[in-house]
């Protein structure tokens, strides 16, 4: 089996991370894979924010736990890096484009020996005025409207990742 297919077939979501920092070079390669995701009409609408700052991570954890209805829970499972994917609202394919960005980054993370887990609630988080203000603070042009697509918990897995369960049958139809 070729390396690409092996990466696709063996990637699993990670829900327990070591606190070990991820090397910036690895994070950059994961982000680059996201930037090369397919996008409708090559509009490249997704933007990626890499968060390693402890205070911002704490705030993201709090707001995500609140939205989830589980105060005190860490929805990022202790991951030292959070990659936030936003997409421009003027692009009709933004959610699809952002989803492909997240998928590419998950595969790249696995290829780099990292664990990852797609975390929802980015849409609700970045629709809040305080988080819109934060986007402007970090340099995202406020005149360019973005919405949250997803967040990626990223880091070294704490333990072995599970193997993939068997795939359900009856989901492929052929028309010859």
Image (spheres, grey):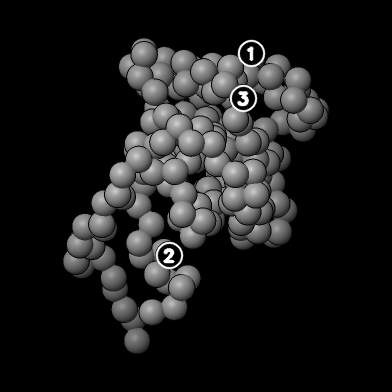
Residue 39 visible here: no
The residue that label 2 is drawn on is 7
Task: Looking at the image, tell me whether mark 3 or mark 2 is earlier in sequence order.
Answer: 2
Task: Looking at the image, tell me whether mark 1 or mark 2 is earlier in sequence order.
Answer: 2
- Tell me, yes or no, whether the two marked residues, 1 and 2, touch with CB atoms within 8 Å: no
Residue 94 picture quarter: top right
Marks 3 and 2, how far apart at CA: 29 Å
- Answer above or below: position of 137 versus 153: above
> Residue 5 or 169: which is nearer the viewer?
5
1 or 3: mark nearer the eye: 3
The residue that label 1 is drawn on is 130
Task: Looking at the image, tell me whether mark 1 or mark 3 is earlier in sequence order.
Answer: 3
The residue carrying pointer 1 sits among few (fewer than 14), some (14 to 19) or many (20 or more) residues within 10 Å by Cα, namely few
The residue that label 3 is drawn on is 53
Residue 116 picture quarter: top left
Secondary structure, mark 2, is: helix
Question: Horizontal and vertical percent for residue 133?
Answer: 70, 17
3 or 2: mark nearer the eye: 3
Marks 1 and 3, how far apart at CA: 17 Å
| Residue located at (42% from left, 71% from top) | 5
Secondary structure, mark 1, is: helix
| Residue located at (39% from left, 23% from top) | 74
For the C terminus, the image quarter is bottom left
Question: Horizontal and vertical percent for residue 87?
Answer: 64, 40
The residue carrying pointer 2 sits among few (fewer than 14), some (14 to 19) or many (20 or more) residues within 10 Å by Cα, namely some
- Answer above or below: position of 66 versus 170: above
1 or 2: mark nearer the eye: 2
Residue 41 visible here: yes
> Residue 30 or 68: which is nearer the viewer?
30
Question: Horizontal and vertical percent for residue 10?
Answer: 35, 62
- Answer above or below: position of 92 versus 144: below
């Amino acid at each position: 089996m070729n390396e690409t297919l092996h990466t696709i077939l063996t990637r699993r979501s990670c829900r327990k991370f070591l606190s070990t920092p991820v090397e910036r070079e690895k994070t950059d390669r994961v982000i680059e894979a996201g930037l090369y995701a397919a996008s409708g009409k090559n509009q490249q609408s997704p933007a990626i924010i890499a968060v390693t700052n402890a205070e911002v991570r704490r705030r993201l954890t709090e707001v995500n736990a609140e939205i989830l209805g589980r105060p005190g829970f860490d929805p990022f499972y202790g991951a030292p890096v959070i990659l936030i994917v936003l997409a421009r609202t003027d692009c009709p394919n933004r959610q699809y484009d952002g989803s492909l960005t997240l998928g590419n980054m998950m595969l790249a993370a696995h290829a780099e020996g990292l664990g990852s887990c797609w975390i929802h609630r980015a849409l609700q988080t970045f629709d809040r005025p305080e988080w819109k203000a934060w986007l402007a603070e970090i340099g995202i042009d406020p005149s360019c409207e973005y919405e949250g697509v997803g967040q990626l918990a990223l880091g070294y897995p704490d333990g072995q990742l599970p193997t993939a369960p068997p795939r359900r049958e009856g989901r492929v139809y052929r028309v010859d």
